[in-house]
Image (cartoon, grey):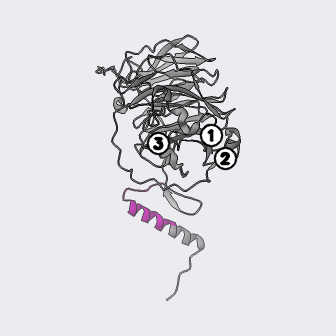
Amino acid sequence: MSLKKYTGRQITNAIAVTALVLLFNNCGKGFQAVKFDDQGSAGLSTPSPILSPLPIPTPSPTPRPSSTPRLPTPTPVPPTETPRPPTPTPGPSPTSGNSIEQLAAKMLVGQWAELTNMAGWDNGSILVPYEFGCNPSDYITQYSEKAAWDPISKRMLFIGQSHGSCYGGLFVIYSADTNSWSKAQYPPVPCQSGTSTNPCFSHGYSHSTVDPNTGAYYYRHYGSLDVYKFYNGAWSMLPKIPAESSTCCGAIEFFPDMKRLVFMDADWGVWAYDPVTNKWVQLANTSVDAVPGLPRVPIAQSSGSLFARYNPVKKEMLLGGGDKLVALNMNGAFAAGANPMGIRLGASVAVVDVDPISGKYLVLSQDRPNMYEYDSGNDAWTTLGTAVPSSLRALTGYGDGLISATLTNYGVNMYTKYNYTGSKVYLYKHSK
């Protein structure tokens, strides 16, 4: 029997034809594009998702919700997503120090660093309103997720209030230059303290922000249309937000590229305040079509608390609540984002921050141990491998007693966690 000789090119062509036939037969739906990585492995190519512009709805009658402020209704813990996210691979070992500038300069990507020897911190006692008869179980970072960072004075500013047997509010400030904590004058709101039978609600939620161009600090009072401004050591009040009503737990954030202060309410829309004209203008509807013709931002009415984060890299603002995400650009246009894993968002269930170097969003969600990264440019989520310090998950989880701030001066994020005498302040370095 004689053997027929084949050239190397003929053999290669025969193998390629066989591979294509097998791929067609296995898929059963025709040919699919195949790409090979640099290891020779094949995988199906999938186009990257992008943010979808929001449609302008056809106006329709919408029932008006109650204007009575309400605490967010607890959301059932969702089942573990399928497939399960990968187990984080430990990153660089945590470090510590007493200077943000020095710590940030030597931190590695993915590393956590504990801030120590802070004057006035007193193991977290600065966060307990003892002057109103409160005890260590009462801390002002309850029902909160965001603090404000002033890049001019290099200070973190936060207003919050305890909840339970004692209601006491405090305005606290951390100074990076002196590595110290202090208390400041409380805003002229209707009440600063209360009891279980006569409560005073003024929780922090996502109600703090700073204009990075002037250093002015803004605070929205719980369950109201009132916003206060702290500048040069004195408080003043802005014109009331001209919405029909408000829910308890909205979000405010300053958008320096728009030169506007943005407020979002789950029911009564998205608003922008112009410090020059001293006026509010509605940008979008939320659950109520209060202004026909405006885009509707898809934030569920039952989502309760919201969040808002300005992105200094991408010049956008990310807003959301429940499992919804919306990006607002500097031209006032909105685009919806994806959340395929159903990660819960909003104050008291999650802490959302933004990396000041890469512009990627960093998410810690109450019922999940990992840190997640959200890339709004590709509308994509990634489970990060960094090992989050266990102390940040103390109490009932990330959504309890934890606030964060974006430290643009140092390229890191600052996380402040109350946990009795085990209270901690950590820096996190996400990129360089």
Determine the secondary structure under disc 2.
loop
* Alpha-carbon span between mark 3 and mark 2: 23 Å
Q: Quadrant of the C terminus?
A: top right
Q: Residue furthest bottom?
A: 1
Position above or below: 222 against 44: above
* Alpha-carbon span between mark 3 and mark 1: 19 Å
Of mark 1 and mark 2, the one earlier in the sequence is: 2
Q: Are marks 1 and 2 in contact (CB under 8 Å)?
A: yes
Q: Residue 247 placed where, x, y %?
A: 38, 23
Residue found at x 57% / y 14%? 275
In the rendered view, does 406 fall on the left or right side of 65?
right
Q: Please give the residue where the numbered disc 1 appears in the rendered image.
A: 412
Q: Please give the residue where the numbered disc 3 appears in the rendered image.
A: 398
Determine the secondary structure under disc 1.
strand
Q: Which mark is residue 77?
A: none
Q: Are marks 3 and 1 in contact (CB under 8 Å)?
A: no
Q: Amino acid at mark 3?
A: Tyr
Q: Of residues 339 and 120, which is closer to you in this image?
A: 120
Which span of residues is magenta-colored? 16-34
Of mark 3 and mark 2, the one earlier in the sequence is: 2
Q: Which mark is residue 107?
A: 2
